[in-house]
Structures are given as C-alpha cells and as structure tokens.
Image (cartoon, rainbow, N blue to C red):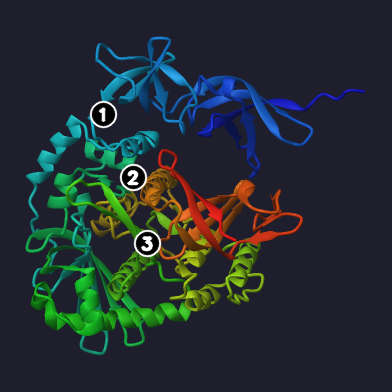
Amino acid sequence: METTAPSRTVTGRIDVHPRGFGFLVVHPSGSDEVLSAFIPPPELNPYLADDVVSATVTASADGRWSASGLSLLKRPRQEVYGEVVLRKGAVHLRIDRDVANGDWPLETAGVEVQPNDAVVARIAEGKAWLLRKLEPGADRSLERIIVRHGLRRDFDAEVLAEVQHVLAMPHALGGRRDLRQVPTVTVDAPSTRVIDDAISVLPAGDGALRLFVSIADPAEFVTEGSALDRTARERATSVYLAGAMLPMLPEELSANWLSLVPGEDRLCLTVELRIDPEGRVTAADVYESLIRSWAKLSYTEVADYLDKGEVSEPMAAVREAMPWFRAAAARLAVSRAGRGGIEMSRDEARFTFDEETGEVSGIEAVRPTTAHTLVERFMVAANEAIAGWLIDRGVPSLFRVQDEPEPQQVADLAAFAQHSGFAAGFGRRLTPLALSAFDRQIADCTAEPALRSVLRRSLGPSRYTVVPAMHFGLAARAYLHFTSPIRRYADLSVHRALKQYLRGRRDFVHEDPSVEQLAVHLNERSRTASRAEKDRHRVLEARVMAGHVGREFTGRITRVRPSGLLIQLDGMLVEASLPADALPNGPYQPDPRETSLVSASRTFTIGMPLRVRVASTDEQHGRVELALVE
C-alpha cells in the first residue's frame, strides 16, 4: 500500500544560498521551531532573498521538507546590486548571488552599459531597471554589501534642508547647568570624528568621588517625527563597514554640530554619579547641561598615563584631574568584581588600509588597553544608573536585556573549555560570578580569542525591550544604552524619555506598547547592521588572506557544522572553514549538539588546536578555506 507524503500550504520567507538553491523559512504559529524547506533552482528563479511567499511544503521519507508552487505575497527588497551580462544578445543583470540565483532582464533607459559593468537596479514587473552605474575603480564588494542589506549612504533633500535649520540653532545655556569650568575630556581613537561622550571626575570632599558622564544631546535638535528623525529611526544605527561608515545622522551634524569637539560649547545630558571609597554608586543625578571639552585624548595617550605616568601635551590642561580618573575606574572595578560578569572590551581584528590607494593592506589583532577598560567602566556605570533612575520613576524605556544561558549552552561552553585545556566547572547553571572567574582564567592565554568567541555565542545576543530585566553578561539588574545617541536611535529614544521627565511629564504608560514596537524594529535593524558588518569583514579577510595561500597557521576549532569545521587562526583572529570532505578518515557527521565532527576512526571537537594551511580564498562570497596539515 502506497502512502502519500504529508504536505501543507504555508507562508514563509525565502533564503537564497549562493550556490544556486534556496530555502523557505517558516515560523509555525504557536511554535518556537523553524521549518526549513528546500527550494530547487527552477522554483527559485523568479524570487529574491527575503521575499514572503505562500508555498506547498512536502516532507520526504527522511523528514526533509521541500517547497513548490511558490506565489509572491510581499517583496521587501526594492533594490539589487549586480553585474551586466549578455544572454543571446540581450542585456541581463547577474544579481548578487546571496540575493537571487538567476539573471534578470535589465532595462537601461538608454544608459550605455558593457558586460561586467557593476550597477544598482530597481526590481519591478519581473525586470531590473537601472538606477545607477558604479564608477570604474569603485569597491564593488562594499556596494554589494550595502545594497544587499538595504543600507543607505545618502540623505534625501528634505533631510538635508532640516540639517541647515539645525545648524542655525545655538548651543545656549538657558536653564541648563554650566559645566564648562569642570575639567572635561573625551577619549577616542585619533581618527574618531563622531564624539558622543565626555568624562570628568572631581573629589567630593568626604572620600567620595563625583563622576560626570556627559553625553551629546541630539534630542534637543532633532524633533521627533521630523524628516531627520524618521530617517534616523529607519536606519536605527550607524553602520561601520571597515573602510567606510554609514552614519545614522548626516555628517554635518554627527561629526560637527552635535559632536563634543574640544574647545566648543555643546549641549549635553549629564549623569553625575557619587562613588564611595568601596566603589559603590551611592547617588545618581541626571540633568541637562552645557559643557566644553578641554581636550580630545586618544586611548594611547590615556593608557600611557595610566600605565607609565606619561603626560601628553593635550593632557596637560587636565593633568591635575587625571589621578581622579584612575581612582574612579579602580573603585568601579572593585564593585564590578564583587558581582561578577565579564569585561566587554576584547581583542578585535582590525584592517589596515594603504593611505594612498585606500586598499586594504593587512589585518591585525588589537588588544584593549587600560584606557579602553576605564572608558568602558564609566559608560557601563552611566548606562546602569540611567536604567535604575528611569525604573524608579516609572518611565518606560528601551532596556537592554541578556538572558541567563540555558544549561545545554553552559555544558557546551564547559566542553569547549575542557578541550582547550581549561577546567570550567560551572555545574548545571552559570552564575555571573562563575562567569567572572572563567573570564579571569582565560585572560591573556593563546586560546583567549577563540574561547571568547565561543563564550559570546554561549551567552547569546542582547536585545531591546520595554520590560526591564537582567543583563547577564554585565551582571546588571537593569541596563540600557544612553551613551551614543548620535550613533544609535535607542540611545536617542532614552534621551527623549529622560528629557520629558526632567521637563515635568508624568503621564507615562507602564511598559508602553509603542516603546516595545520600537524595540522590535531596532532589534531587527541592529541585526541587519551586524550582518552587513560581518559580511564586509569576511570579504576583506578573504582579500587579505589571498596573499597567504599556502601558508601554515595554528588555529582552534570554534564551531562544528555538517559541512565542516570553523577554525580561528591564532594571532590574526581570522575565522576560516575546513571542509568535512577534505578531512582524512571520513566520512564525517556532526554529533547531535554539533560540538564534534565524528567518523568511524576519528573525532574533531570544538576547542581542539589544529595545524592548518590556507588552501583557497573566495572574496566575492567572503570565504577562506583551509586544509589540515598532519
């Protein structure tokens, strides 16, 4: 007796694989599980990544699902990047293979194009309509990533007109507290042009210290609901694509009029913390202020002072205040250590660029300095204080929440640590203090970057929500983003709530649904920005590593997939793939938790060190492939 394979009609989103096939991703109602159904190339041809479609999904005997009979319901993506090709003499567009697997007819509106020209086009009526052609020499991979993720470089005329209006608004004292005589500095990388935060520390006279964290006040200039605000809300965040930055607000504002540049009066929101000798924050005061930065210091300058007592020329103006900065940071460190959590500053892979050509020239691992740690402690303390201040007054806001990891995630992290030579000993539940103890174990070891990569994955992502809850990684009862309102819309929203309360509003709605709606939008846009930044990072990694093909490295397994292993190379922080079919003694299959890749005679487990060779690179898809060196 024959049985009919179960099938049903569903609605889902299309995910395109660059190898020419795709999947229909379905979130069944009332379930946390995700159904993923294979879409064969012929069915996929008329569709783009992120299209919402209805389809019939059918389960095969082995439990795998396939999709057929697709019908378009919604197309969020309006623009695509591609390169011109000829098909039987007709002009077509080979669209970015992460977005579409086919070549679409291209309408050029009379613009002359040649094969291999890179263009951006609008999708309509089953065709691609030319919008603009890239100039010769343009960084195609950068443009591909920007268009792929729906990001924007430019601002429209209405926004630019509002910028001119803002530039005419003065930074006037009005009823604000005047902090211009308080020795105030900013600390950033030398190349930083967008400066959101400034810091000051003064003794309070009874053993306590007064820490001032003053944050630029764009809410005073950007009216809610204006064109500037709508654009900032839609972008949600500035996006940092190595070698390029897409600002949330136009640069005339973000890098000039709103930025806390030295020697200029600037409107701010200041949180003033009173820190006792044991590091406890005993009081927090929030107010609108007018400041003037006395000096723009670099992380290197501040680290040289903290570590070696060296005073740079810009630091001379605030030399007498510098010991208090060190004292405040030390006190906050004692308090943080007592409750657990981890330091957020970490090693980063940073690309270097040729000054003349602008081309990427290398990649280096950059370690956080004592100055990075000092600034981080001040900013975290300010963000926590504002979160508590708003909760105490019943003001709904965008809180930043990170859940406690699940027991299985804790077990996976402990297994990774064990294979890396560390005894985690967490037990079933990971506490913030246990996390802090593990953080100290791995500090400064060779495997630290790989261990931190797995640790961050185990902790899981943070998210915005109107419901205040713990931020596990920081061991904070409540936390939010307050310190970067020029670069993040969440911070700008927090500023508006603060200013409304300071100016007398009291009719706030408990856990306001409109704030939660904003949180959902910002979470999605933040994920999009993060994906774009990772795509750009992988492309540049592949570009740099093309010059290292054949070279051997030591690396450590950081992830196991059915297709193979992900290896982080020591020293460079490059993560590359080691395909399963290139491993000896195969075939291999992942274990149920995907912590090991197993064959009949051999096992590769996360945390294991391996000697590998760079076998090949694929810049277009941002891939670096390795071969095992036995």
Please say if the residues under marks 3 and 1 sit with CB atoms less than 8 Å apart: no
Can you identify the residue that label 2 sits on? 236
Quarter of the picture containing the C terminus is: bottom right
Identify the element where label 2 is drawn.
Answer: loop
| Mark closest to the chain's N terminus, 3 or 2 | 2
Q: Please determine whether, in this image, residue 52 is positioned above or below residue 153.
A: above
Kind of residue indicated by mark 3: Glu
Residue 544 position, x and y percent, is 36, 50
Give residue 348's mark: 3
Q: Please determine whether, in this image, residue 51 is positioned above or below residue 32.
A: above
Which of these two is toward me, 425 or 603? 603
Which of these two is toward me, 590 or 219? 590
| Mark closest to the chain's N terminus, 3 or 1 | 1
Is residue 17 found left or right of 34 in the rendered image?
left
Which of these two is toward me, 22 or 622? 622
Identify the element where label 1 is drawn.
Answer: loop
Give residue 483's mark: none
Can you identify the residue that label 1 sits on? 134
Residue 488 position, x and y percent, is 31, 51
Kind of residue indicated by mark 2: Ala
Q: Nearer the viewer, mark 3 or mark 2?
A: 3
Please say if the residues under marks 3 and 2 sit with CB atoms less than 8 Å apart: no
Q: CA distance from mark 2 to mark 1?
A: 26 Å
Residue 584, can we see it? yes
Tell me the quarter of the picture where residue 506 sits. Answer: bottom left
Which of these two is toward me, 8 or 124? 124
Which residue appears at 44% of the width and 80% of the height? 337
Kind of residue indicated by mark 1: Leu
Is residue 206 found left or right of 281 in the rendered image?
left
